[in-house]
Image (spheres, rainbow, N blue to C red):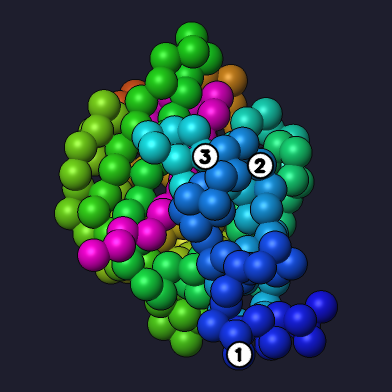
């Protein structure tokens, strides 16, 4: 309960087997939670949040904030839906821009995992990742590209605002979200579009699938996409 929560905060968050306020998936992993899955964390005081922890990939401890896996969830949503989050715990979801902002206020690294329909896996990593709050239009603050088998398709989206079909914050003359049927940190318009339509691999339309240009161009839609971050402790 919140009473317990406050009590243990006053006690300095000492773990006595009743309640310990874990702030992220990396702390959960350090406590011995080695299975990937949905966990409750307390990123700020007593406010609980359910997140998907990837405890397996690249050392584990990642909070997954975007997942595409089977096309079961519509990602062509409005500003308010992307703000709050949507989708299914079992398949595909967006964690919500307010949540992503809260969770990335401290230093985090970003990892993107992609799998194609031939079961080939590629990834990209960035040294730091955060998004600003709603008053700053969830602007993407992205650190240096570290390493990758997928190439860098986020560079042009660095320092761009989030754009949805009902709120055009991109520098293009048209609304990129309306054109590409999704929401993203659009430039003029994109090199990556991981919230795009769930095409089954190669598609005739240009740039409206789950595309990562540096890897498979803008006419190939990946089968699986996961975007995730974890704390970088100094």
Q: Compare marks 3 and 1 and give the one earlier in the sequence.
A: 1
**Residue position for label 3:** 55
Q: Nearer the viewer, residue 142 or 79?
A: 142
- Between marks 3 and 1 in the image, the one whose residue lies nearer the viewer: 1
Question: For residue 198, what is the image quadrant?
Answer: top right
Q: Position of residue 113 (x, y in %)?
A: 43, 34
Of pointers 2 and 1, the one earlier in the residue sequence: 1
> Residue drawn 71% across and 81% down?
5
Quick check: can you spot residue 92?
yes
User: Answer yes or no: do the residues labelled 3 and 1 have beta carbons within 8 Å?
Assistant: no
Q: Nearer the viewer, residue 48 or 156?
A: 48
Q: Are marks 2 and 1 in contact (CB under 8 Å)?
A: no
**With 128 as the anchor, is 83 left or right in this view?**
right
Task: Find numbered disc 2 in the image and state the secondary structure of the residue it sits on.
Answer: strand
**Rendered view: 203 above or below 71:** above
Magenta-drawn stretch contains 21: no
Mark 2 highlights which residue? 37
For disc 2, the neighbor class at 10 Å (few under 14, some 14 to 19, many from 20) is some
Could you tell me residue 136's position as x and y percent?
41, 82
Vertical placement of residue 226 versus 10, above or below: above
Q: Quadrant of the C terminus?
A: bottom left
Disc on the earlier residue, 3 or 2: 2
Between 51 and 211, the residue placed more toward the observer is 51
Q: Which residue is mark 1?
A: 10
The residue sitting at 26% across, 27% down in the picture is 149
Q: Which portion, as a residue range, is magenta?
A: 218-234
User: Residue 214 got which mark?
Assistant: none
Disc 3 and disc 2 in contact, CB within 8 angstroms: yes
Q: Is residue 201 above or below residue 12?
A: above
């Amino acid at each position: 309960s919140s009473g317990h929560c406050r009590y243990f905060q006053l006690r300095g968050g000492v773990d006595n087997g009743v309640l310990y306020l874990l702030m992220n998936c990396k702390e959960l992993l350090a406590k011995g939670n080695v299975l990937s899955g949905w966990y409750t964390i307390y990123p700020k005081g007593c406010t609980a949040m359910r997140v998907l922890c990837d405890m397996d990939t690249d050392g584990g401890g990642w909070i997954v904030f975007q997942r595409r896996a089977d096309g079961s969830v519509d990602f062509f949503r409005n500003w308010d839906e992307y703000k709050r989050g949507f989708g299914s715990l079992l398949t595909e979801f967006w964690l919500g821009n307010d949540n992503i902002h809260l969770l990335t206020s401290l230093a985090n690294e970003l990892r993107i995992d992609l799998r194609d329909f031939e079961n080939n896996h590629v990834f990209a990593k960035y040294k730091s990742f955060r998004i600003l709050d709603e008053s700053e239009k969830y602007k993407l603050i992205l650190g240096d590209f570290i390493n990758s088998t997928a190439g860098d398709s986020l560079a042009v989206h660095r320092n761009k605002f989030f754009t949805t079909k009902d709120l055009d914050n991109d520098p293009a003359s048209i609304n990129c979200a309306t054109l590409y049927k999704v929401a993203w940190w659009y430039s003029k318009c994109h090199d990556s579009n991981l919230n795009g339509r769930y095409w089954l691999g190669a598609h005739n339309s240009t740039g409206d699938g789950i595309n990562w240009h540096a890897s498979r161009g803008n006419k190939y839609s990946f089968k699986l996409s996961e975007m995730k971050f974890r704390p970088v402790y100094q």
